[in-house]
Image (cartoon, grey):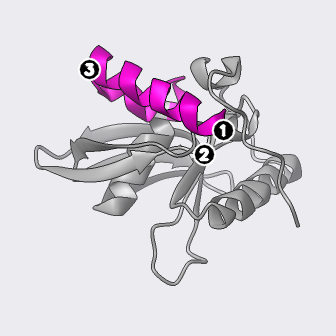
Amino acid sequence: MTHRPFVPWPHPVLRSPASPVAVITDDVRAIWDEMIIAMDNMPGVGLAAPQLGIGLALAVVDASTARGQAVRMANPEILHSSVEFREHEEGSPNLPGVWARLSRPRAVTVRFLNAQGEIEERDFVGLWATSVQHQVDHLAGKMFFDHLTKLRRDMLIKKARKIVS
């Protein structure tokens, strides 16, 4: 199975808050399946629906080494973040070829609708937590480079444009 293409920065869907998902349907499950294929093809450890041009609050995360452990989330909300931080290189297929080292909370507690349509709260640690926070940013219309200074952000975007052209 293939997936729809990643929308390129600065597509408006990447800057718009995603619409909440009221109920988990077969259509939502199909979108999650497509997102997992796209995430695995990157290869990446998470993906938000807006990255594929879908304006719904859907995300998938799989930071396992074996893969096949994807957590499907609708309307993820971070309830608690640790005071301890970790650094990680982050990037996006929507702005290919550039990365930035960000510092985010090492652990988060997240509430979301799971694949069965039930409200679930789960703790994520390490790379899992970083990926969840990255996806929640996407669902709020933010990109990873929004955490940088204006100077660093402008340099990164300029570099990405040179790579693409």
List x then y, in percent, for residue 61: 53, 58
Residue named by callout 3: 149
Task: Say whether residue 26 is left or right of residue 19.
Answer: right
* Picture quarter with the C terminus: top right
In the rendered image, the quadrant that contains the N terminus is bottom right
Residue located 57% across and 39% down the image: 163
Dot 1 and dot 2 residues touching (CB under 8 Å): yes
Q: Residue at x 42, y 34 (%)?
A: 144
Mark 1 — residue? 51
Judged left or right of residue 133, residue 157 is right
Gap in angstroms between the C-alphas marked 3 and 2: 21 Å
Q: Quadrant of residue 80?
A: top left
Return the mark for residue 93.
2
Range drawn in magenta: 138-165
Quote the CA–CA distance across marks 3 and 1: 23 Å
Residue at the image position 71 percent from the left and 54 percent from the top: 35
User: Would you call the spot at circle 3 few (<14 residues within 10 Å), some (14-19), or many (20 or more)?
Assistant: few
Is residue 142 shown in magenta?
Answer: yes
Amino acid on which the number 1 mark rests in the picture: Gln
Q: Is residue 17 visible?
A: no
Q: Residue furthest left?
A: 84
Question: Residue at image x 79%, y 47%?
Answer: 28
User: Crowding near pointer 2: few (<14 within 10 Å), some, many (20+)?
Assistant: many
The secondary structure making up most of the magenta span is helix
- Nearer mark to the viewer, of 1 and 2: 2
**Spatial distance from mark 1 to mark 2, Cα to Cα?**
8 Å
Tally of numbered discs? 3
Give the foreground label among 3 and 1: 3
Occupied quadrant, residue 151: top left
The crowd level at tag 1 (other Cα within 10 Å; few <14, some 14-19, many 20+) is many
